[in-house]
Amino acid sequence: MRRQRRVLLMLRPPEDSRADYLFLGFLFLLGVVLGHVAGGLVREDQQHELADYVLRYTQASSAENTVSIPGVLFCAFRSPLTLYLMGLAACGSWMVPLYVTGQGFFLAYCVHCFSASLGKGGVLLAFAAFGIRCLFVLPCCFFLASRSWVSARQRLRGSSVRDGAVPSLGGAFPPIICGIVLLIACIVEISLAPRLFSLILQRYY
């Protein structure tokens, strides 16, 4: 019982970072809106080129019935690891919000381009390519981003130098938990993505 309570306390957001979840969530949604607007500016000839590229990629993936394991691992761990490392430097005080906004932008931009170039099937292909991963990755990103942002702002204020205390990212437990979640995400994506690609291609193309 005590061990479970200790685990929950380690995973609980720091007192001064709970409001940051709302702010970072707002920045992410702002990026989503900007990405959707930018996606609408893609020319029609570029949409056709994108459609050809996406169809070739998905057809190859479904034919081999496999995906690149190193590629899946890289895509899953890239953003959470980057956000975690940003908390180790003072520059993370502005890089973390910028990165979160960029995440929302590029996700919405890609989904918009898929749907604009491939129609309804493009939306489903976008879910197969990004949605499964995002169900696991985005919670980990916000979980680590709030802690990193607090730590980076503390470093910017110089609290570690004046007080002799190094700003904490919540210990080793949060990244370990996120690592386990991300490994599960990789297993799910490797198992499901090729099959989803195959089903969608058979249904719409």
Image: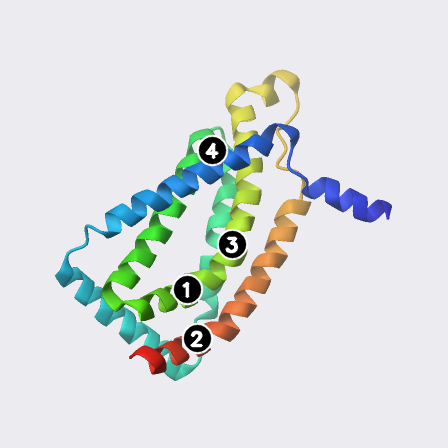
N-terminal of the pair, mark 4 or mark 3, is 4
Question: In the rendered image, which quarter contains the C terminus?
Answer: bottom left
State the separation of the CA atoms marked 2 and 3: 19 Å
Instruction: Answer whether residue 87 is visible to the viewer in this image.
Output: no
Tell me the crowding category of disc 4: few under 14, some 14 to 19, or many 20 or more residues within 10 angstroms, Cα based.
many
Residue under pointer 2? 196
State the separation of the CA atoms marked 4 and 3: 20 Å
**Residue 173 x %, y %:** 68, 46
Name the spot of residue 204 as percent of width and height, x first.
31, 78
Secondary structure beneath disc 1? helix
| Residue 105 falls left or right of residue 89 | left
**Callout 2 touching callout 1 (CB < 8 Å):** yes
Q: Quadrant of residue 12?
A: top right
Residue 127 circle label: 1
Q: Earlier in the sequence, mark 4 or mark 1?
A: 4
Residue at the location (45% across, 58% down)? 75
How far apart are labels 4 and 1 at the CA level?
Answer: 30 Å
- The residue tagged 4 is 92
Q: Are marks 2 and 3 in contact (CB under 8 Å)?
A: no
Res 201 seen here: yes
Q: Is label 2 in a helix, a strand or a loop?
A: helix
Q: Which residue is mark 3?
A: 137
Looking at this rendering, what residue extends furthest in the right direction?
1
Residue in view at x 43 percent, y 35 percent: 97
57 lies above or below 97: below
